[in-house]
Image: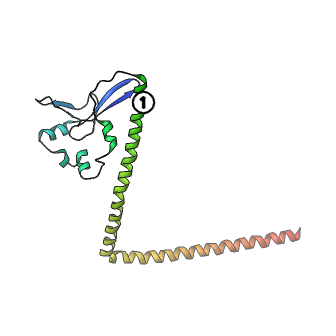
Amino acid sequence: TQYCFVLSVNNNTMRIEKCYFCSSPCYPGHGMLFVRNDSKRFRFCRSKCHRNFNKKRNPRKVAWTKAYRRTRGKEMAVDSTFDFEKRRNRPVKYDRGLMGKTIVAMKRVEQIKQTRDQRFFENRMQDAKAEKKKQARVEIEKSIELLAPAVANREEVMRNVIDNAKSRIAARKKSASKLTTTGNKDMMED
């Protein structure tokens, strides 16, 4: 399946196609188009993708492509919003109301797709957080002898901070009590 977007800016429409190899957008005037003998069209966003296609590399096995990310479960592979991106070659008579509704629907579909992508990413990262904590605990257990002196120093520093804070509080109390006693004497003299 080939995907294609139509971007409308101030009544100037341009067709944004997808790269056959990496699935990134191909803007007008960028990339290249290869037409095979059987009239199948392959659009590439840059020469990097074209070279890899010519070398007969599989996009699902090349780490920087969208196909790779989808097969490894790093991005959503199945979702109803992908059906809206498919290219439709059926001509439709221009209708101003229909075009307005279509543009509103496209924006809404894009918004839904972004929220689903975000939710998918957060769910995927929950497992990663647990795994990261587990690895950190294992690392701490392996090198606990390195951390022991640092913990001892931290306790000593905390004691010093607490002692300094207590002495400052006591000094403030003394100065506050001196001010109140001198204020009382001034009132008695008046």
Q: Residues within 10 Å of mark 1 (few under 14, many from 20)?
A: few
| Residue 65 in sight from this viewpoint | no
Question: Taking 156 as reference, is 84 left or right?
Answer: left
Q: Residue furthest toward the right?
A: 190
Question: Taking 90 as reference, is 186 left or right?
Answer: right
Q: Identity of the amino acid at label 1?
A: Lys
Q: Colour scheme in the image? A: rainbow
Quadrant housing residue 50: top left
Q: Is residue 21 above or below residue 179?
A: above
The one of 172 and 117 positioned closer to us in this rendering:
117
Quadrant containing the N terminus is top left
Image point 39% across, 30% down: which residue?
102
The one of 178 and 141 positioned closer to us in this rendering:
141
SS class of the residue under badge 1?
helix
- The count of marks equals 1
Image point 12% across, 31% down: which residue?
36
Query: Which x, y percent locates residue 43?
Result: 21, 33
The one of 133 and 148 positioned closer to us in this rendering:
133
Q: Is residue 174 above or below residue 42?
A: below
Question: Taking 89 as reference, is 53 left or right?
Answer: left
Query: Which x, y percent locates residue 81?
Result: 34, 41
Image point 37% across, 28% down: which residue?
8
| Residue 114 in sight from this viewpoint | yes
Question: Taking 160 as reference, is 73 left or right?
Answer: left
Quadrant housing residue 128: bottom left
Quadrant housing residue 111: top left
Query: What residue is shown with label 1?
Result: 101
Quadrant containing the C terminus is bottom right
Query: Which x, y percent locates residue 133?
Result: 35, 66
